[in-house]
Amino acid sequence: MYSPPATPAEARVDLAAIRHNVTLIKEAAGGAELMAAVKADSYGHGLVPVSEAALRAGVSRLGTAFIREALALREAGVTAPVLSWLITPDEPLDEALTHDVELSASDVRLLDEIAAAARRTGRTATLHLEADTGMSRGGSPPAAWPALLARALELRAEGVVEIAGLWSHLACADIPGHPSIARQLEAFETALKLAEQAGAGGSHVIRHIANSAATMTLPEARYDMVRSGIAMYGLSPVPELGDFGLRQAMTLVARVGLAKRVTEDSGVSYGHLYTTDRETTLGVVPLGYADGILRHATGRAEVLAGGRRRPIAGRVCMDQFMIDMGDHPLAAGDEVVLFGPGDDGEPTAQEWADSLGTITHEIVTRIGARVPRVYRG
Ligand SMILES: *Cc1c(COP(=O)(O)O)cnc(C)c1O
């Protein structure tokens, strides 16, 4: 049933799809706990509504990149455990501790900053120590791991921190059979063993390394908890292996702002990359690269308009792009679907990602703040 959006465009988020996906991921995770990755505004789907839906569906923990994302959850009244893993200098550590945000630490410098915040606030910091097992992003490299453990244990003895988790992240879990996967899992085992020997292990410590791709394809990587983002939004973590039964949660729609007949040989948009080859109807769609519709979607991505797939005609502008309808009817106010689950013939986010040479994470997280998120289900 069509109900026109109040704004020229909206991202519809199907919370029933999120719940369905959580159920599937939990099955794939076996008995492991499920942390939902809700960084970057829940991958563009809206931080709080998605987090609440995920928790209701059986997610037990939330994960954000930045502390301020975790604090936004607390401000909204979300009380579930939240871990923040991207902590740069001058982050609000005191506030994180007073609001029970769990913190990842990769080096002694940060451990000492966290300890200082714990002494200031009188709160015990809940730590997840991150090992770099071969991605070379966050995490302690193997050579620095023993010193990190030693410092964390000293601080634990002082009562300012507790060690709640030991974790790492895989670089190539979405490339089945990639040789780095086994190497990283082996390095993780080594890091865990050292932690155990040093006294930082134990059954209360949560070990976690799997993202969505690893959750769906690598049972040996589940450990005590998996951290899933993209699969929860219903987008395949390993597109070459299919959709795993996941259901895309986001549908991006816009209403045609202007429809008009133009003559043959009309140059369309900046640079005239597209020229009409006959008299035709053009539709102007009020979404542009400021809203996350990549400028190079020109001539690549398709939308569903008037029941038909139409390519983007000419350059995507900052706020708008054009489609060429030929002689098919189109009127101002008609709904255009950029992507959705595909049920009505609209392109999926995966098709957009494929046609633009990127991953679905980038397609959905880039949808800008001007586009309202509307929830159903
Ligand atoms: C984003 C992120 C995840 C989730 O990854 P998906 O591939 O979206 O499942 C898990 N762990 C960390 C550390 C992340 O940054």
Image (cartoon, rainbow, N blue to C red):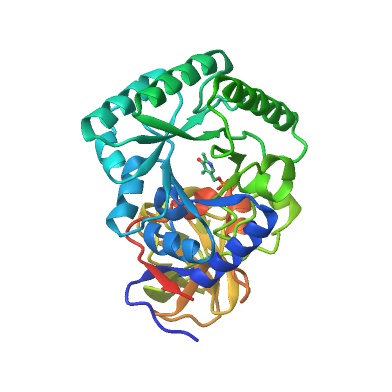
Q: Is residue 193 above or below residue 320?
A: above
**Most distant residue in the right direction:** 177
State the image quarter where residue 261 is shown: bottom left
Q: Is residue 64 above or below residue 157?
A: below
Q: Nearer the viewer, residue 304 or 276?
A: 304
User: Residue 25: x, y in percent?
Assistant: 63, 57
**Most distant residue in the left direction:** 120
User: Residue 311: x, y in percent?
Assistant: 56, 63
Q: Nearer the viewer, residue 279 or 219?
A: 219
* Residue located 59% across and 46% down the image: 226
Question: Would residue 340 be seen by someone viewing this image from the given angle?
Answer: no
Q: Is residue 257 above or below residue 133?
A: below
Please state if 313 lies on the left or on the right of 123 as rendered: right
* Residue located 38% across and 30% down the image: 161
User: Count the marks: how many?
Assistant: 0
Please state if 15 lies on the left or on the right of 125 as rendered: right
User: Residue 92: x, y in percent?
Assistant: 26, 36
Q: Nearer the viewer, residue 362 or 51?
A: 51
State the image quarter where residue 143 is shown: top right
**Most distant residue in the bottom direction:** 1
Question: Would residue 94 be seen by someone viewing this image from the given angle?
Answer: yes
User: Residue 207: x, y in percent?
Assistant: 58, 37
Q: Nearer the viewer, residue 259 or 23?
A: 23
* Residue located 55% across and 26% down the image: 131
Q: Is residue 216 above or below residue 191?
A: below
Q: Quadrant of ligand 1?
A: top right
